[in-house]
Image (cartoon, helix red, strand yellow):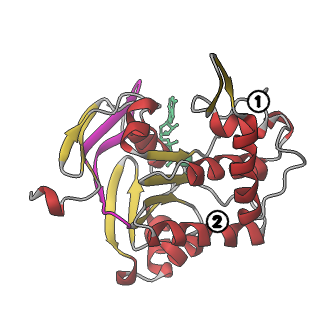
Amino acid sequence: MNKKNAPLIRMENIHKWFGKVHAVDGISLTVDKGEIVGLVGNNGAGKSTLIKALVGVQPKNKGTYYWKGKEVEIKSIKDSRALGIEAVYQDQALVDSLGVVKNIYYGREPIKRFGPFKTIDFDKMKSEVAPLFDELGLDVASLDQEVRFCSGGERQGVAIVRAMLFRAKMVILDEPTTALSVPAIKRVLNFMKALKQEGISIILISHNIDHVYQVADRIAVISHGHKILDENTSENTKEEIEGVLHETAGAVYEEI
Ligand SMILES: Nc1ncnc2c1ncn2[C@@H]1O[C@H](COP(=O)(O)OP(=O)(O)OP(=O)(O)O)[C@@H](O)[C@H]1O
Ligand SMILES: [Mg+2]
């Protein structure tokens, strides 16, 4: 493939096993620059596993990634971050004992120098984060509040602000709207549209087909570790996608 026209990411024949469970069974998926792909499927379909492999938190067992047409290794979060991939997980990987701002910058804190001394620049961190919380309309009691005292919605807000702040090339959102209030959902969906306008690519995992249809260019349906549909949003109605999900619910894994 001509590298110039290559998608931002191409996942090719990705496999992931957890013991006997073949959670991702040879999935291939591409996302173009500035494209929003909705990844849907029933509980346990393999959606989170596919993206955790892409992000490097639980690396794949088999398969290949191509970033702008060039083969790349993703074995850790460090690898995916170096490419510009930022993820908001379903089960938030936050450090409970740290405050909101420290969680957002964890491992990437800005440094301030006083002559020979170096220190973390907390003022800079707070001044960058506060407007983003405002923009999302997410109220936390205090930016210093320990994350273990945050609600589920606030925790997701923390992760979304992190994705906004680090201006990723690709943002992966795994169920970003489940714990949010109606106005916050609207802001998150608008935030996704704004990222798209800037040429940033998004994978949105959601059980809410309505939310997916509001933003996605393309929908991929995952069932039992396989991709069973991958089409432009305009090619299917919401009801058709819901029908596909209904048909594939309840089936069981084959023993391997
Ligand atoms: N860390 C793990 N150890 C063992 N099995 C796992 C692990 N993570 C996921 N699985 C299994 O892999 C399969 C796929 O799970 P996954 O979390 O990817 O599903 P999902 O599509 O994200 O579902 P949901 O919509 O409920 O979030 C399931 O059978 C699940 O039990
Ligand atoms: Mg999941």
Query: In the figure, is residue 241 to the left or right of 162?
Result: left
Q: Amino acid at mark 2?
A: Val
Q: Is residue 40 visible?
A: no
Vertically, is 154 above or below 218?
Answer: above
Mark 1 residue type: Asp
Extreme residue toward the front, this view: 115
Please state if 16 lies on the left or on the right of 210 as rendered. Answer: left
Residue 109's place in the image compared with 216, above or below, is above
Q: Main secondary structure of the magenta part?
A: strand
Residue 129 position within the rendered picture, expressed as x and y whole percent measured from the top left: 71, 50
SS label for mark 2: helix
Residue 92, given in percent of the width and then of the height, sits at: 65, 40
The tally of labels here is 2
Name which of mark 2 and mark 1 comes first in the sequence: 1
Numbered circle sitting on residue 96: 1
Provide the residue designation for mark 2. Answer: 188
Q: Is residue 93 above or below residue 229?
A: above
Q: Is residue 13 left or right of residue 149?
A: left
State the residue in front, 80 or 42: 80
Quarter of the image with the C terminus is top left
Q: Residue furthest left?
A: 1
Q: Position of residue 110 (x, y in %)?
A: 61, 34
SS type, badge 1 = loop
Q: Is residue 31 magenta?
A: yes
For residue 61, what is the image quadrant? Answer: top left
- Locate the N terminus and report the quarter of the image it occupies: bottom left
Image check: 126 left or right of 167? right
Q: Is residue 203 visible?
A: yes
Which residue is found at the position 47% from the left and 51% from the top? 168
